[in-house]
Structure formats: structure tokens, C-alpha cells
Amino acid sequence: MRVLLAGGGTGGHIYPALAVAAALQKQYNAEILYLGSDDGLETRLVPAAGLRFATIQAGKLHRYVSWRTVQGLVRVPVGMAQAVGIVRRFKPDVAFSSGGYVAVPAGLAARLNGTPILMHQQDVAPNLSNRLLVPLATRISVAFADSMRYFPAQKTLHLGNPVRQAILDVRTIPVQEAREKLGLLPDVPVLLVTGGSQGARHLNQVVCQALPELLKQCQVLQISGEKLFDETRVLSEQYLSGLGAEIRQRYKLVAYMNEEMPYALQAAEIVLARSGASTLSELAALGKPSILVPLPPAIGSSPQETNAAMFASHHAADVILDTNLKPELLVERVTHILSSITYILDMKQAVQTLAKPDAIQEIVETIAQMQKGVANAKPGHESVQV
């Protein structure tokens, strides 16, 4: 079986595709080609995973006019031509799209080649790229049940979001052991702060400002993002300078985590994070209480705000809008959660109801069915001919 994977730009689009690739190779000895953009995070992560990798000049699509929009439009026809050539040479049996602006030319090229496409929707609401792909997709898989209403029922399945096996594996590791592995104190609660693969400047700034109060009640493991590490280090030192050595050792700042990230999540009592789909799926898989600060919209509505609102509606997370995030409010929320065992347990139970731990297996089986031309429908859906 030859499978084309397409998705990129951020870790949220890449990690699920890598998880699917690993399962396809293990179960079906599949030949994989990962098609990504030439300037995204996938240029580092995909080769590191040992996968065959090809890049195109993918232009990001915006719904508003700007110089970046013009630059993106110039890249679109070039990227489209590159994608068509790559797909024709590879001759995939099935294409799996995990999102990002590279998914559009990859999907068009696959369709022109007569290749069936499984389009994966990670966020609750589809972005522009996936809305453009809907007519081209043979099947659509969604991460959350709340997404079903956005897509044609006859070809849409709620399969969940692929979560890295390394994330699933740490579920059996005691929290104290995970903390010790990261050099943290085993018996002091941990607030894990992560702004995603690219970091989040405002999140970093507010956490640094809140450190004197936060460190009185918990450890803080802050993942700044590589580009924001130096400025975050300088800012954190300003707020740590007046604290004693015993309190200061409760703070750990790192630029980026990959292989250690599963342990960081397992070590956490609370996770302060953006609300990208992959982050939410990992929180659900591990049953972690969280405070979500969704990425604010550039224009119109924000997919992350929709994601966070869905989690809040299920009582699976607390939500603070980015514009409302202040040190005092953050300290208040952290204190409230840590001071109530009942609140923590209720949030853990609620977030676990949103987990789909078998998502990878279901997606892999769907790809295999599409390769065979079978596409049997799940209960409540009509069958889809491939």
C-alpha cells in the first residue's frame, strides 16, 4: 500500500500524520511519502521520523487582503504544479490530509490523479483549507463529535484525533516518576505552560509576571518556544531575582520539547496552553485538567476559541480569552483548581469523555478500506463508494 500524507506548518498538523504513518508502516508495511511545505516545521520533524519527504512552495490562504496574501497567491500555482508532479511519480493508493495550507495543493493533485482522499478535521470548526477540500474528499474524519454538523453526513466519521503512541504510553507511568525524569520535585504540583510548537509571547509574559505568586503553590515548567526563549529567560529572571533559592528551583524554562513532551504532560497537575486540536486531544488522552488560552483571531472567528468553548461546554477545561489574560487572573484560576480536589477530579473525568484512544487504529483501518475500495459505513452513515 502506497500512502501520501500531507499536512504541515505547525506541530498540530504534523504529529497526527506522523502517528498515522508509524501505524501504517507497522501494520501494513506501507510505503509512505510525506508531502509538506518548504518552510514549515515538517522540514525538521518528518526527516527525523525517517520518512520519505517531498516539499512544495505552499502559499498560505488568507480571507483578507495583505502583502502576505499576495505573496501566498504567487506561491500557489508553483506549489500546485510541484504537487501534481510529485503525486504522479509516487502513484499513491490513498492520500491522507492532516490539514494546513499545504493540504490544498496536495489534495487537488491527489484528486487529479484519481487517488481517494481521507481528509482529517482536527479543530471543531473547519478552516479555509479544509472547507476547500471537502468536495474533493472521499471520506472525512473528525476529531470531535461537535464537528459532525459542518460536513456531509454520508461521508463523515467521528474517528478522533491521532495521538502519538508516546503520549498513550505514559498513561501507566506514575506522575511522581514523570516529574523525577524531568528533574522536577516529585511531590510538588506542576503547572505546565506550553504555547504550542511556535510558542506564545503573551502567554510567556503573563506567566513570568505571575511567577512570584505561582511558585508559592506549585512548580512551573514553561516551554517558551525556540524563537521566544531568550526574551522569556530575560523576563523570568527579572521576576525570579527577589525570590529565595528554594522557591527559584521550582521554576524550569525550556525552549522546546519533543521526546520529553509526553513526560511533561504526565507530570502536570494543570496544563496552561493554547487550544489547538492536537493539544486538546493529548489532554483528553491523559485526563489532564487545563486552563486554555485560545489563540485570538486575526480576523473573524478563531478555530482555537471554538475548540476551547467546546471543552468548556463539557466542563473539561477552564478558559481565559487572550485579551483577558492577566497575572492576577491566572494566579486566581490556578489557586482555585489546586485548592479543590473535587474540582480537579471532576475536570479529569469530563476531559476523558472526549478522548478517542483508538483514533489511530480507526483511521488506519479506514485508509486500508479505501485502498481496497471497500469503505463500509459506520452505524448511522450511508456507505461511501470509493
Image: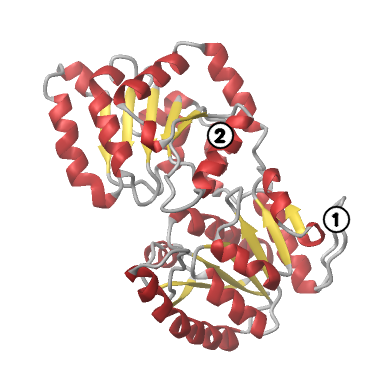
Amino acid carrying label 2: it is Leu
Binning the other alpha carbons within 10 Å of mark 2 as few (below 14), some (14 to 19) or many (20 upward) gives: many
* 3D distance between C-alphas at marks 1 and 2: 30 Å
Question: Which color mode does the image show?
Answer: secondary structure
Q: Which x, y percent locates residue 123?
A: 57, 50
Specify the quadrant of the image occupied by residue 131.
Answer: bottom right
Image quadrant holding the N terminus, namely bottom right
Quadrant into which the C terminus falls: bottom right
Residue drawn at x 47%, y 17% is 337
**Can residue 223 be seen?**
no
Determine if residue 334 is in view. Answer: yes
On the image, numbered disc 1 is attached to which residue?
381
Q: Secondary structure at mark 1?
A: loop
Q: Quadrant of residue 311?
A: top right
User: Image height check: is 319 above or below 297?
Assistant: above
Which residue is at 55% across, 58% downward?
127
Q: Which residue is mark 2?
A: 286
In the displayed structure image, the side of residue 102 where residue 350 appears, left or right: right
Residue 238: percent from left, percent from top: 13, 30
Residue 369 in the image: above or below residue 218: below
Frontmost of labels 1 and 2 is 1
Image height of 121 relative to 318, above or below = below
